Image (spheres, helix red, strand yellow):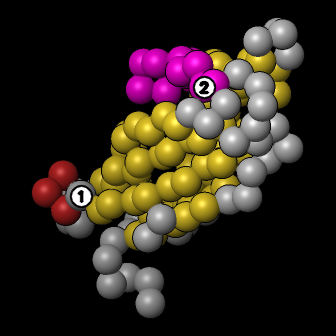
Amino acid sequence: MPGMENPDRHGFIIETQVSYLPDRSSESDRRFVFSYTIAITNTGSITAQLISRHWVITDADNHVQEVRGQGVVGEQPLLQPRQRFEYTSGTALTTQVGTMRGSYRMKAEDGTEFDVEIPMFVLSVPRVLH
């Protein structure tokens, strides 16, 4: 189910969609794999480049994994006003349910850097959460 957050103060909307990948998962090995698609839309008036990401991934046992890195899926997209960038990536959990949240570090044309929050979304094997 897609999630949506109101635009942040810089005018970026983050939308998320999650899929469980049963063919890449193994319940007996406690490996539950999910893909997620993120759409970033610039609804503001400034052009900004996504330079890095920070994820906080929490499983049902409250094990927290933090991931930091440059760009997303090997890219550092430049988003002009009214432009949208979408990508798909994935993660694995040792539990059937978890959450992800985080932020993107953006750099405006004038060199100013700011963070855009990625609202929390749920990773769940179908029929586990009601």
Taking the spot 57% from the left edge, 41% from the top edge, the residue there is 40
**Residue 97 screen position, x and y as percent:** 45, 69
In this figure, what is the number of numbered marks?
2
Taking the spot 24% from the left edge, 58% from the top edge, the residue there is 21
Magenta segment includes 7: no
Taking the spot 44% from the left edge, 39% from the top edge, the residue there is 86
Q: Say which quarter of the image contains residue 50.
A: top right
Q: What is the span of residues highlighted in magenta in the rendered image?
A: 69-80
Residue kind at label 2, given as amino acid type? Leu
**Residue 55 screen position, x and y as percent:** 60, 41
Q: Which is more foreground, mark 2 or mark 1?
A: 2
Closer to the camera in the image, 6 or 31: 6
Disc 1 crowd, CA 10 A, few/some/many (<14, 14-19, 20+): some
Q: CA distance from mark 2 to mark 1?
A: 30 Å
Say which residue label 1 marks.
21
SS type, badge 2: strand
- Extreme bottom residue here? 130
- Residue 12's place in the image compared with 81, above or below, is below
Q: Is residue 64 left or right of residue 25?
A: right
SS type, badge 1: loop
Closer to the camera in the image, 93 or 52: 52
Q: Is residue 19 left or right of residue 129?
A: left
Closer to the camera in the image, 99 or 7: 7
- Residue 62's place in the image compared with 24, above or below, is below
Residue kind at label 1, given as amino acid type? Leu
Residue 79 got which mark? Answer: 2
Q: Say which quarter of the image contains residue 43.
A: top right
Taking the spot 82% from the left edge, 27% from the top edge, the residue there is 114
- Secondary structure mostly seen in the magenta stretch: loop
Give the quarter of the figure containing the N terminus: bottom left
**Mark sitting earlier along the chain (2/1):** 1
